[in-house]
Amino acid sequence: MSWKDLMYLGVIILGVILFLYGANYYDGTVGWAGVYLAIAGFLAGIGLQVYELLKKFLLKRRE
């Protein structure tokens, strides 16, 4: 697992923890921030993997 994957996993876990904290203490702002953080970490991880796949594909095609 690369350091990038660990960073995205950490952001997702932090988002889930913030969501649970906000839900437990009835703080909507913290809860929604956690939801958005988890979604952003998930989408960023997928986006990076798609970018790396496209980069490999385009480099093979160029040769």
Image (tube, rainbow, N blue to C red):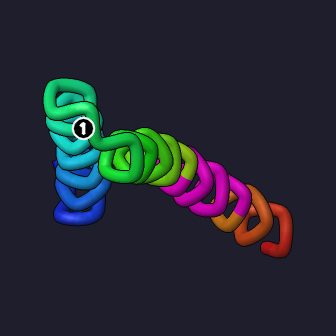
Q: In this view, does 9 lie to the left or right of 51?
A: left
Decide whether the magenta segment is chiefly helix, strand or loop. Answer: helix
Query: Which residue occupies 39% across, 41% down?
Result: 28
The secondary structure type at the circle numbered 1 is: helix
Q: Does the magenta stretch include residue 9?
A: no
* Magenta residues (range): 44-54
Residue situated in front as seen by the camera: 15 or 55? 15
Q: Quadrant of residue 57?
A: bottom right
Label 1: which residue?
Answer: 22
Query: Which residue occupies 61% across, 54% down?
Result: 47
Q: In which quarter of the image is residue 61?
A: bottom right
Q: Residue furthest right?
A: 62
**Position of residue 5 measured from the top left corner of the image (x, y, whole percent):** 27, 52
Q: Quadrant of the C terminus?
A: bottom right
Residue 36 higher or lower than 3, as above or below: above
**Position of residue 12 measured from the top left corner of the image (x, y, whole percent):** 30, 43
**Position of residue 15 measured from the top left corner of the image (x, y, whole percent):** 29, 45
Q: Is residue 2 left or right of residue 52?
A: left
**Position of residue 23 measured from the top left corner of the image (x, y, whole percent):** 26, 27
Residue situated in front as seen by the camera: 56 or 61? 56
> What type is the residue that disc 1 sits on?
Gly
